[in-house]
C-alpha cells in the first residue's frame, strides 16, 4: 500500500518559476527521500532528509519535513525545461517498527516546465 | 560505473508464456530490489535480496512470480505463466549499505506487455 501521497498529481509551470511539490505520509519514518523519474527511465535519487531534520538543501532543491504533520515538501527553484519529470517521495519506516531496507513510494507528481 | 543493467528493455509476450527479466546490479552493492510500476498501483516493491539471500518477498503478487539471485552480479525475475495484468514496467535497483545506507540506484526498467 502507498505510504506517501504526493500533491499535486500534475504541475505545469514556466521556465524560471519555482515548483513546489508536497508529500504526506501515514506512519512514523526513519527518513524520507525524493526521487526523479524522467519519461521512460529509472528513478534517480535526489535528496534524503532524516526524521530529526527539518530542512535540507542541495543545489536548487530544498526539502522540508514536518513530522508532526507527517508531510514533506520539495521546492525546485529557478526551474528549467530539463527539470520536466515525475517526482516521487519515498519513506523508510523506523527499524523498531519493522522498517528495514524497504522504500515505500507515493504515486508521484508529474512536473512540466515549459520553455 | 555502468549502473544497474536490465534486460530486455522491452518484452512483448502472449498470455501463458514464461517471461524472464534480468538484472545486473552495480558491482559491490549488497542489496538488490525488484519493483513493479503501473499507473494504477504506482511503484511497488516485489522482493529484495541481501548478499544474494531473499529477505522479504511479501510483495510478490502470487506464486506465478519467482526471483533468484544466484550470485552477487545477477538476478532474475520470472513470471510463469504470464497474464495481461502483469503488464507493467519492472525495475531493478541496488544499494551498498556501507556507502549509501538508504539511497537506491535504479536500472532503466523492462517494459513488459502481455497480450
Image (spheres, rainbow, N blue to C red):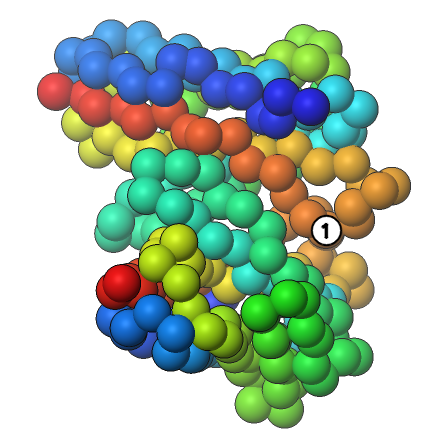
Residue displayed at 57% across by 83% down: A70
B37 vs A85: above or below? above
Q: Residues within 10 Å of mark 1 (few under 14, many from 20)?
A: many
What residue is shown at x 64% (from left), y 61% (from top)? A47
Chain of the residue displaying label 1: B
Q: Position of residue B88 (x, y in %)?
A: 29, 34
Residue for point 42% across, 23% down: B65
**Residue at 74 percent of width and 20 percent of height:** B27
Q: On screen, A47 above or below A78?
A: above
Q: Kindly indicate the quadrant of the structure image that contains residue B78.
A: top left
> Which residue is more in the foreground, B51 or A32?
A32
Q: Position of residue A99 (x, y in %)?
A: 70, 57
Q: How many marks?
A: 1
> In this orientation, which residue lies closer to the viewer: B5 or A32?
B5
In the picture, which quadrant includes the C terminus of chain A? bottom left
Q: Position of residue B49 (x, y in %)?
A: 68, 29
Outermost residue, left side: B115
Q: Is residue A84 visible?
A: yes
Q: Secondary structure at mark 1?
A: loop
Give the answer, above or below, for where B78 lies relative to B39: above
Judge from the rendering whether residue A14 lies leftward or rightward of residue A66; answer left or right. Answer: left
Asked whether the viewer can see residue B33, the reply is: no
Q: To which residue does mark 1 refer?
A: B102
Amino acid at each position: 500500500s502507498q505510504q506517501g501521497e504526493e500533491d499535486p498529481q500534475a504541475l505545469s509551470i514556466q521556465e524560471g518559476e519555482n515548483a513546489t511539490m508536497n508529500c504526506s505520509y501515514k506512519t512514523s519514518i526513519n527518513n524520507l527521500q525524493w526521487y526523479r523519474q524522467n519519461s521512460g527511465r529509472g528513478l534517480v535519487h535526489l535528496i534524503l532528509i532524516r526524521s530529526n531534520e527539518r530542512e535540507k538543501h542541495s543545489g536548487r532543491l530544498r526539502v522540508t519535513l514536518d513530522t508532526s504533520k507527517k508531510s514533506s515538501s520539495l521546492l525546485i527553484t529557478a526551474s528549467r525545461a530539463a527539470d520536466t519529470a515525475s517526482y516521487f517521495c519515498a519513506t523508510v519506516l523506523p527499524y523498531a517498527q519493522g522498517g528495514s531496507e524497504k522504500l515505500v513510494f507515493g504515486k508521484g507528481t508529474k512536473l512540466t516546465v515549459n520553455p | 560505473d555502468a549502473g544497474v543493467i536490465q534486460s530486455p528493455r522491452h518484452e512483448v509476450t502472449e498470455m501463458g508464456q514464461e517471461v524472464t527479466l534480468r538484472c545486473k546490479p552495480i558491482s559491490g552493492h549488497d542489496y538488490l530490489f525488484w519493483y513493479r510500476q503501473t499507473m494504477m498501483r504506482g511503484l511497488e516493491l516485489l522482493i529484495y535480496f541481501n548478499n544474494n539471500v531473499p529477505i522479504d518477498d511479501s510483495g510478490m503478487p502470487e506464486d506465478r512470480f519467482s526471483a533468484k539471485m544466484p550470485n552477487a552480479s545477477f538476478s532474475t525475475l520470472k513470471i510463469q505463466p504470464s497474464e495481461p495484468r502483469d503488464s507493467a514496467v519492472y525495475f531493478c535497483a541496488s544499494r551498498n549499505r556501507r556507502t549509501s545506507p538508504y539511497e537506491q540506484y535504479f536500472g532503466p526498467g523492462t517494459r513488459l506487455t502481455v497480450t
